[in-house]
Amino acid sequence: MKLLFESWRGYLNEAELKYSETAFEKILETVRTAVESDKEFFKKIKIPAEEVFYLDNKKIKNGAVILWLAHFAERPQRLGEMNFVHKEWNSETGMRDRILKQFIIKPLEILLNIDKKRPTLGGAGTGALKGQPIIILSINPWKHSSRDQIKSTIRHELQHITQMLNGYALEYGEALFDANGDASKLKKISFSSFEKEFGIGSQKTGLRQLSAKQAKERGISEKERTKRYLGDDFEYETWMSDLLDDFVKWLKDNEFINKSTFEMAALKEENPNILLEQTNNIKSRKLIINLAKQLGMKPIDFVKYMKTSLSFNQLAVKFSKVILTNDQILSKFAEDSNMNSYVKAVKTLKKLRPKEFAGDLVKNLELRLRKEIEK
């Protein structure tokens, strides 16, 4: 399977869409408190800018400053009052570093809404608090079946917030560079919708999910509504992470992978030529004897085991291929995960994103497996 990357990933260091782990931990702890006390919560949560913005992109970096000043500062500034931006402007890189560094460290705030009456597991969107626009993350932990499911929902919605914030920052950044640093020429963006598409993959489907009511009003069939839901561009990255959460757990629960699997994969990558060199390299032979001893194995058995063990990439290719080509195993995984929609989702995305879905799945699964060895 050839790995294919979306064009927007050209300035990303990781494959899966990032999210604020600081906010994740705070939200998870607040949710735990809410469930234990059986109370709903409204709470402001801070998100460190460096954990959510892709700051290697100059337009996002500069736009994030405008976004913070115009929307998230304690006393938001009007765009026409940001004269310092033009004074500190470089047409190639944007605002000078000494200015950028002052604001990039500023945290942003989102509103956490823990709502017992919410009909869905969670959601991320926009609203207003005391007349000021704000980004809201909502969750109903009482509708979840496990702590792992709660964690997946929090991560999923934080990834949507990443999409929103980077989209807004990119909107401001592009306009700022077009205006050569003159902030007075910018138009204040609305938080009412995604103004700038971000983190939606390269093979855009153009599909957007609809509620049952909206579909009925437009005469759209349930089959088509399901397709729009599964193929929604803004759900692709977050859905991929949901699938990986459950798939890695399923592989471990069914002992398709274990601690030994990760250790051998790591050993193969740390010592790629150890088996080739063992016959005429004393150092390699000694290393094999030492490693075999650590694992409680005879050297000859260790060599046989290492020959048949797989690298992280080989493991990712193997298991991705299984759920992409074996309907029986895909159905079993979906059933065990209590997510029957995975069957339809995998088949739908294979058709809608034939050039990137398989490659993204392999690459992201490989990164997830590498993280397992760190645990």
Image (cartoon, grey):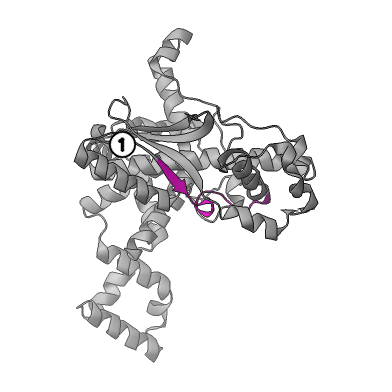
- Residue ranking furthest to the bottom: 282
Q: Is residue 344 above or below residue 109?
A: above
**In the image, what residue type sits under mark 1?**
Asp
Mark 1 Cα shell of 10 Å, populated few (<14), some (14-19), many (≥20): few
Name the residue carrying label 1: 327
Q: Is residue 140 above or below residue 306?
A: above
Q: Is residue 304 above or below residue 154?
A: below
* Residue 2, position as x, y percentages in the image: 51, 50
SS type, badge 1 = helix
* Residue 289, position as x, y percentages in the image: 28, 85
Residue depicted at 30% across the width and 48% down the height: 29
* Residue 332 in which image quadrant: top left
* Residue 322 in which image quadrant: top left
Residue 157 as seen in the image, left or right of residue 326: right
Residue depicted at 72% across the width and 43% down the height: 82
Query: Which quadrant does the C terminus fall into?
Result: bottom left
Residue depicted at 37% across the width and 69% down the height: 266
* Residue 38 in which image quadrant: top left
Residue 140 as seen in the image, left or right of residue 216: left
Q: Nearer the viewer, residue 13 or 313?
A: 13
Q: Is residue 45 magenta?
A: yes
Q: Nearer the viewer, residue 53 or 87?
A: 87
* Residue 336, position as x, y percentages in the image: 22, 39
Q: How many numbered marks appear?
A: 1
Regarding residue 201, the answer to whether it shows in the image is no
Residue 14 as seen in the image, left or right of residue 75: left
Q: Is residue 193 magenta?
A: no
Q: Magenta residues? A: 44-58
* Residue 151, position as x, y percentages in the image: 32, 45
Regarding residue 316, the answer to whether it shows in the image is yes
